Image (tube, rainbow, N blue to C red):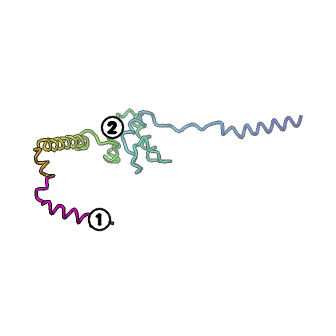
Amino acid sequence: MIKVRVISLAMLLCAAGSLPLMVSPLPAQQPSDRAHQIGGKFMCMCGCNQVLSQCNHVGCTVSTAMLKEVDQGLVRGDSEDTITQAFVQEFGTKVYAEPPHSGFSLVAWSMPAVYLAVGLVLVLLVINRWRKRPAHAVSNASDHSGISPEMLERARMRAARETQD
């Protein structure tokens, strides 16, 4: 009888000791999916040069605080533009993950297309000039009109003499 009580007591103590391992703590309030979506338009200001919603520094308090600020703005009913303007006022335009599609930043979006068009026009002009070049100009370039056969033979003999091993 005592043996059964000791075993029961030991099992009770083991169960009580492992109870904290079985019960997980309540998770911290996670930012909503909409906050992560809006956070994808900003850079994390911790200096990692990563998008806010994808900052993977262990224990990065900056990204956590910024996402929390976005989430709180959404809970208050702020629009995406209001949240964006608040971040721009706080951190400047470097907070943008990509430049806005207006004003001077529009140049950053349009210049690659302009460079492509200018390059394409230049390539087409060069090809057109090459095609219009007369055929005899090409054949004359390979002609040895300025070199006599004796000078050519002397150069070949000298090259053969100097390259002998």
**Nearest the camera: 155 or 113?**
155
Quadrant (top left/top right/bottom left/bottom right) for the N terminus: top right
Residue range (magenta): 143-165
Nearer-N-terminus badge (1/2)? 2
Residue 6 left/right relative to 100: right
Labels 1 and 2 touching (C-beta < 8 A): no
**Nearest the camera: 124 or 45?**
124
Coordinates of residue 80 in the picture (x, y in percent): 35, 35
Other-residue count near label 2 (Cα within 10 Å), few / some / many at <14 / 14–19 / ≥20: few
Coordinates of residue 92 in the picture (x, y in percent): 32, 47
CA gap between label 1 and label 2 equals: 78 Å
Instruction: Give the residue drawn at x 39%, y 43%.
Output: 51
Coordinates of residue 16 in the picture (x, y in percent): 72, 38
Give the number of the mark in front: 1 or 2: 1
- Which mark is drawn over residue 163? 1
Quadrant (top left/top right/bottom left/bottom right) for the C terminus: bottom left
- Which mark is drawn over residue 82? 2
Coordinates of residue 139 in the picture (x, y in percent): 13, 48
Other-residue count near label 1 (Cα within 10 Å), few / some / many at <14 / 14–19 / ≥20: few
**Nearest the camera: 156 or 5?**
156
Residue 159 in magenta stretch: yes
Q: Amino acid at mark 2?
A: Thr
Instruction: Give the residue drawn at x 35%, y 45%.
Output: 95
Q: Main secondary structure of the magenta part?
A: helix
* Residue 110 position by quadrant: top left
Residue 165 left/right relative to 56: left
* Residue 4 position by quadrant: top right
At mark 1, the secondary structure is: loop
Instruction: Give the residue drawn at x 42%, y 37%.
Output: 36
Residue 31 in magenta stretch: no
Q: Amino acid at mark 1?
A: Thr
